[in-house]
Amino acid sequence: MEAAESQLSISPYVALRSLLLPWFKSELEAALALKPPEKGEGALISSISKASSIDELLPLISEARGLARLEAVSKLAELARNSEIREKILSLLREPSYEKVSGDLLVALGKLGLENGLPVTENIISVFDELPDSVKAQACVVLGVLRDEKAADLVWSFLQRVSGDRQLSTAALMALVDLGDDRANDIIVSALEKGDFTVEHLGLAARIGDERVVKPIMKLALLSDNPRLRVAAINVLAYIVKMKGTRPILPYLSHSKKTIKRLARQVVKLSRQPLSYFKLFHPLDKEFY
């Protein structure tokens, strides 16, 4: 059971999801604090903040990274409070020429839903069938964070259709887990048992809390040649113990093999960390933000 190195890189769909999470800005600021600012970043942020129309803002979005990207999606969300601007965003999502900024457009809609309570789920669902698959995957991620159960069947149908594409299907799986849809559980468990998984699958396994994931993840923590995977696996096990108690790993705590028993005790000790300790996907990566 081993994931290829390419499977360890951060998914752009994880990056997209992070833009909608309340803790993300402070985490990103901390991650970027030790790195020199991008050339022209200050001027770009200033231009974004001064933009008064979506036509002024769109050319700036594709240049934005780091804090500039956060500023851009926040500005988009501010403009999209106007119903005509929302309609324009939905129209742009349908156009292949705007695919490069589609994630930012969708995040702006998501922010509107989360922060202003606007019914953007219905807006996104209304155009979903007209979107390219890569944009559908982005839409799934945003719908998941919005946690509107009306989107579950749509996301499930998309997952069924793109099951052969690792990136697209993982985006849909993340959305289903965010939506609390148990149909994701068997897929995640199967991926881990077969060894056909990404680090995102590990994070999702922790979140669903299905005890069937413990055995393959324990095996990964013990046998993987990749230290990053071992650490990720141990974190997942510790998170499961934190949320469910020690029952899922009791057989390992009393195992006859010392290495297994020692690992199980390490997991229990790690589970005492605060919830904020656990990073269930990847650490922040400036390349994607």
Image: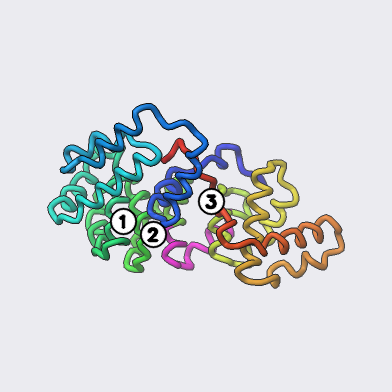
Q: In the rendered view, does 239 fall on the left or right side of 140?
A: right
Q: Is residue 42 left or right of residue 5?
A: left
| Magenta stretch: helix, strand or loop mostly | helix
Label 1 crowd (10 A; few <14 / some 14-19 / many >=20): many
Q: Position of residue 88 (x, y in %)?
A: 16, 48
* Separation of marks 3 and 1 at Cα, in angstroms: 20 Å
Residue toward you, 10 or 275: 275
Helix, strand or loop under label 3: loop
Looking at the rendered structure, the kind of residue marked 1 is Gly
- Give the camera-side residue of 99 and 228: 228
- In the displayed image of the protein, which residue is found farthest to the top? 39
The answer to whether mark 3 and mark 2 are in CB contact below 8 A is no
Give residue 237's position: percent from left, percent from top: 66, 60
- Number of the label disc, if any, that sits on residue 145: 2
Q: Which residues are magenta?
A: 175-191
Q: Secondary structure at mark 2?
A: helix
The residue wearing badge 3 is 281
Q: Is residue 163 visible?
A: no
State the residue position of label 1.
110
